[in-house]
Amino acid sequence: FLIIYSIESVMQFIYFGWRMILDSWLAFDLFVVAVSWVTEFNSGVGGPFQIIRAFRIFRTFRLLTRIKVLRDLTAAIFEVLPRMGAIALLLSLVLYIFAVLFTELFREVEVDLAKPFGDLARSFFHLS
């Protein structure tokens, strides 16, 4: 894959020239490819730079900025997140109410020599 990424970087450099450095994604690609070549030929350097090679997966995030449908979908997800947080908070409140209720009602009930609702923490665990 390193050869394919290198060919891609050369083609981008031919197309963009030195303007390639101004685009942050392309500069990131070039940096990752260069570090990959350094670690490929110099195994003693590998340690801390091996992590940078793993960052190649972040190249796929470019799709979020280049494809309109994905950009719109991402914007919609971030727009809905506060409402989802409110729903999670409401569900947590309902779970808390039932945990307190079950703890008070079934504190002494034993099931298989255990008290599943003996305290609030166990009630949370068994209700969730």
Image: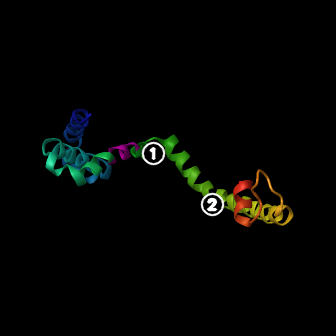
Please state the extent of the stretch shown in magenta in the rendering.
55-60
Q: Is residue 126 left or right of residue 30?
A: right
Q: What is the secondary structure assignment of the residue under circle 1?
A: helix
Q: Secondary structure at mark 2?
A: helix
Above or below residue 10? Residue 109 is below
Residue at 59% in and 55% down:
79
Q: Position of residue 95 (x, y in %)?
A: 75, 60
Of pointers 2 and 1, the one earlier in the residue sequence: 1
Relative side of 44 to 80, left or right = left
Quadrant of image for the C terminus: bottom right
In percent of the image, x 21 and y 37: which residue is there?
6
Q: Amino acid at mark 1?
A: Leu
Which of the numbered marks, if any, corresponds to residue 82?
Answer: 2
Q: Which residue is mark 1?
A: 64
Quadrant (top left/top right/bottom left/bottom right) for the N terminus: top left
Q: Position of residue 29 (x, y in %)?
A: 27, 46
Label 2 and label 1: CA atoms lie apart by 21 Å
Mark in front: 2 vs 1: 2
- Verify whether residue 58 appears in magenta: yes
Looking at the picture, how far across and down is residue 62, in whole percent? 39, 45
Q: Nearer the viewer, residue 20 or 126?
A: 126
- Label 2 neighbourhood size at 10 Å, few (<14), some (14-19), many (20+)? few
- Mark 1 nearby-residue class (10 Å; few <14, some 14–19, many ≥20): some
Q: Is residue 88 magenta-colored?
A: no
- Residue 107 is left or right of residue 126, and the answer is right
The rendered magenta stretch, by its main secondary structure, is classed as helix
Residue kind at label 2, given as amino acid type = Pro
Residue 72 versus residue 86 in the image, above or below: above
Q: How is this picture coloured?
A: rainbow
